[in-house]
Image (spheres, rainbow, N blue to C red):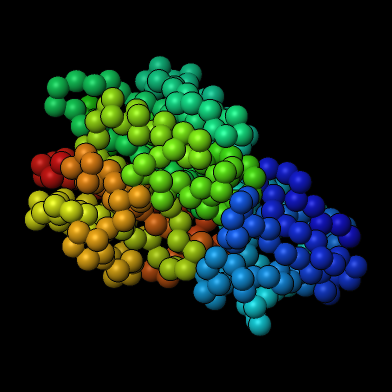
Amino acid sequence: MQITSAFDSGNIEVVACDHASDIQLKIQTDHNTEKFQWFHFALHGAGQTPCQLKLINAGEAAYPKAWQDYQAVASYDRETWFRVDTAYQNGQLIIDHTPACDLIYFAYFAPYLAERHRDLIAVCQTDERLQYHCLGLTPDGQSLDLLQLGEHAPGKKVCWLIARQHPGETMAQWWMEGCIDSLLDESNAVSQALRAQCVFYLVPNMNPDGSRRGHLRHNAHGTDLNRAWRSPDLATSPEVAYVRQKMEQTGVDFFLDVHGDEELPYNFIAGAEGIPGWTAQHQAQLDGFKQALLHASPEFQTQHGYPFDAPGQANLDIGSNFIASHFKCLSMTLEMPFKDNDALPNPAVGWSPERAAAFAPASLQALLRCLQHALL
């Protein structure tokens, strides 16, 4: 048997791999940090063999509570991912599985690989409705890619959607792929109406370096990009600096930052209630969007989420808080689960790439509803 992870978004350290019943592994930390949680590796040569894989440092992960009721994902073809028997005991995450093939991949969530991102951008740039922009280069020398849909005109709203500030939250980019597909669908009346009223700026992956390195939350410098918005540094958080520079040029009327939450098994919206100067109008915008999304999809709910910040106490280093405060607009974070959606469970796959992509059009419906009710 062999364990490998020397590939895009791979992350694991092999402690022992001599016995199928006691494979011992460690998750590696994000570069220049002590935080870890994302794993992605391949097991070779164990077809038809009962295996027990132990991630022995799981109890030291960034979010150890996230392992409760969590099931790892696996795939033979890297296209179809399914849940496998997983337990959290005595600080170890234990995966029990008998592979049907001699090569099987395991991951924290279904990976969204750099080549798929490149393919997405390459295909999109050939669509005459879209403009491609390279905002700049990341610390590892990758392009930070932006897609623009539509042209500015009087009365049009400027809508920014970004995903994957935290690279291990791959469901965010699966969502973004579904969003782009929906926006470009000529048979979709909602998207047609939105294209007539809005200019869209889409960043499918805010953190390509962390994604390729197999990080959970940080870029190549070890910076948490979603804690860098107030004062982004071109040396340590250029990704945020480039996006902010472009936003200053375009303005922002609507902002949605797409993430994944390790612990909560629900889809939910985190607003910017704690920013200085929060008004009743801000609250009406936020409530209106959440209610519209609630009506648009049974995958969404409003009972579970993050506690609200106290008035004036929001952390303006966080993207959605900074944008809400700086641009005085409706600005939110959309969170999706790593586990299953307990509001609409599917034990075989849990929350999945397909469900994340299918959930995206509901947010576009909610945006249109807000436009129709003059909430933006």
Placement of the C terminus among the 4 image quadrants: top left
Residues 30 and 69: in front is 30
Residue 371 in the image, given as x and y percentages of width and height: 16, 40
Residue 138 in the image, given as x and y percentages of width and height: 54, 33
Report the residue at 33% width, 44% height from top: 230
Residues 160 and 357: in front is 160
Report the residue at 35% width, 50% height from top: 317
Looking at this rendering, what residue extends furthest in the bottom direction? 90
Report the residue at 65% width, 81% height from top: 89
Specify the quadrant of the image occupied by residue 157. top left
Residue 198 in the image, given as x and y percentages of width and height: 24, 30
Q: Is residue 354 visible?
A: no
Residue 293 in the image, given as x and y percentages of width and height: 27, 54
Above or below 92: residue 212: above
Report the residue at 44% width, 68% height from top: 265
Placement of the N terminus among the 4 image quadrants: bottom right
Specify the quadrant of the image occupied by residue 254. top left
Q: Is residue 123 visible?
A: yes
Q: How many marks?
A: 0
Specify the quadrant of the image occupied by residue 140. top right
Above or below 81: residue 120: above
Q: Is residue 204 left or right of residue 98?
A: left
Q: Is residue 79 left or right of residue 333?
A: right
